[in-house]
Image (tube, rainbow, N blue to C red):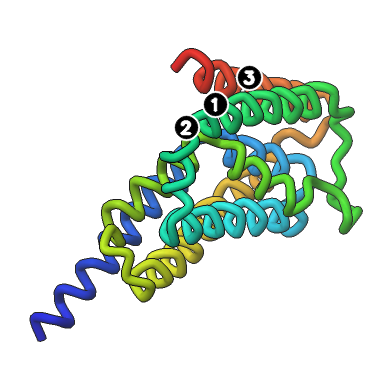
């Protein structure tokens, strides 16, 4: 029974780490929130899935030894940081110049899954979270632990980010006019710019 309790405690701790890292505000969640407002919940799930899959792939590769490459080539961290800043500014520009028209009637509307995945891979904080998580829960390099942590993270991350999409869809009831959507998107663009600034000066 003690072995079962220890395993359950470990899984709960993994889930708590994933929840804390996934549900708190960040560039991806800001973009998902805006997508939920403009395109609705279902279309935004593509972005949610892409962000979740992208992060979990990164998490898995870190667990399997990718962090060693960063230690061997520390300049890669700088490249990732500036690429992330550029991508955040690009997404901010896309939001700021959006026409504010709701796209809920178009099944193909809204950001694609690849957008969420790219944002995760260009986000230095995602790399740090992956390294910290694997260091805390799978430092031994045991493949079973690495895969279990990744699987738990996928479920928690998807549910957490999906909450932001749902929140956006809920807010759209009060932001039905294009002018209000444009104002909201520009506010989200400012937050993305602030995230980019934090990567540079934080």
- Please give left or right for residue 36 compared with residue 81 in the image: right
Of mark 2 and mark 3, the one earlier in the sequence is: 2
- Callout 3 secondary element: helix
| SS under mark 1 | helix
Residue count near mark 2 (Cα–Cα under 10 Å), binned few <14, some 14–19, many ≥20: few
| Secondary structure beneath label 2 | loop
Q: Is residue 168 left or right of residue 74?
A: right
Q: Which mark is residue 193?
A: 3
Q: Position of residue 184 (x, y in %)?
A: 70, 26
Residue at 23% of width from left, 74% of height from top? 8
Q: Pointer 1: what residue?
A: 78
Compared with 48, 172 (above or below) is: above
* Quarter of the image with the C terminus in it: top left
Disc 1 + disc 3, Cβ < 8 Å: no
Residue at 86 percent across and 49 percent down: it is 109
Viewer-side residue, 48 vs 151: 151
The Cα–Cα distance between marks 1 and 2, rounded to whole angstroms, is 8 Å
Question: Crowding at label 1, few (<14), some or many (≥20) Cα neighbours within 10 Å?
Answer: few
Residue named by callout 2: 74
Of badges 2 and 3, nearer the viewer stands: 2
The picture quadrant where one finds residue 158 is: bottom right
Asked whether the residues under the numbered discs 1 and 2 touch, taking CB atoms below 8 Å apart as contact, a structural biologist would say yes
Q: Quadrant of residue 152?
A: bottom left
The earlier-in-sequence mark between 1 and 3 is: 1
Q: In the image, is residue 3 above or below residue 18?
A: below
Residue 180 is at least partly visible in this image: no
């Amino acid at each position: 029974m003690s072995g079962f309790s220890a395993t359950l405690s470990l899984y709960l701790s993994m889930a708590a780490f994933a929840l804390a890292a996934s549900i708190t505000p960040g560039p991806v969640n800001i973009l998902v929130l805006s997508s939920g407002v403009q395109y609705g919940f279902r279309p935004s799930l593509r972005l949610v899935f892409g962000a979740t899959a992208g992060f979990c792939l990164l998490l898995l590769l870190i667990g399997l030894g990718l962090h060693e490459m960063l230690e061997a080539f520390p300049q890669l961290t700088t490249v990732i940081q500036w690429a992330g800043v550029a991508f955040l500014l690009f997404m901010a520009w896309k939001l700021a110049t959006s026409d504010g028209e709701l796209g809920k009637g178009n099944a193909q509307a809204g950001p694609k899954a690849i957008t969420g995945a790219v944002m995760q891979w260009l986000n230095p904080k995602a790399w740090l979270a992956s390294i910290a998580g694997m260091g805390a829960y799978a430092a031994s390099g045991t493949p079973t632990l690495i895969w279990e942590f990744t699987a738990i993270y996928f479920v928690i991350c998807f549910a957490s980010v999906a909450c932001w999409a749902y929140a956006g869809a809920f807010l759209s009831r009060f932001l039905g006019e294009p002018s209000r959507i444009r104002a909201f998107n520009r506010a989200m663009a400012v937050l993305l710019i602030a995230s980019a600034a934090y990567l540079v000066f934080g």
